[in-house]
Image (cartoon, helix red, strand yellow):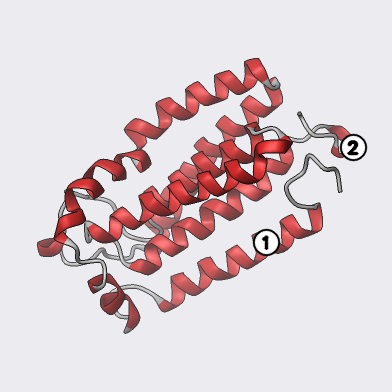
Amino acid sequence: MSESRFVSPSRTYLLAFILLALWFAMLFLGGPRSVADPVLLGLFHAPALVPAARLVTRLGNAFVLLPLCVAAALVLGWRVSRRAGLVYLTMILAGRAVVELEKSMVARQRPAPAGQLVHVTSLAFPSGHAAYSMMAWLGLALIAAPARHRVLAVVAGIALALLVGSTRLVLAVHWPSDVIGGWAFGAGWVLLWARLAEGKAGVPVR
């Protein structure tokens, strides 16, 4: 394996398969009729965290993420390669479209509106904030970070995505399975697309 890669191709596909299996588990086992989801959601009832959650959750909002992702893609195209910038932007836009398709096909309802602490209108599964933040921040870490800093960048990207997704539970607008499903889809999507950012014959863009 090239030292500039984060994981080998075989491990990439294995991780993507595991994440897909987790997504399916959250799809079939979670939701308003599950036993675990309502109980787990209650564990995130923390009024003291709500002001911070309202702020941090914006890092998964389309109105914030899309401009940031476009700017990141332009910088990638300038500083790394056009291929890297194009792959990153396509990954984000296509990922958003797939998440919206998933929502419409699954048609899972969110927790009761009376308990929601922010206004939402879309369907529940998977959590868009969890998926979009994972795609944006983990994707940027894998594609943009130089090899010597990649592990740290990946840890930071995943941590930020986990933080953003968790705010949806504090704000009571998603079931835990929605958020876990969003994280799983976003991470798996990134792993597959990040491989496209590599050059021919497995030569990385950096």
Q: Quadrant of residue 168?
A: bottom left
Name which residue lies at 49% across and 24% down: 70
Residue at mark 2: 201
Residue 131 in view in this figure: no
Q: Is residue 149 above or below residue 1?
A: above
Work out which quarter of the rendered image holds the C terminus and state it.
top right
Tag shown at residue 15 = 1
Q: Position of residue 167 (x, y in %)?
A: 30, 54
Q: Is residue 16 above or below residue 98?
A: below
Judge left or right: residue 20 versus residue 161. Answer: right
Residue pushed farthest right?
201
Residue pushed farthest left?
114
Q: Position of residue 44 (x, y in %)?
A: 26, 66
So how many labels did they put on this image?
Answer: 2
Q: Position of residue 113 (x, y in %)?
A: 14, 61
Residue 84 in view in this figure: yes
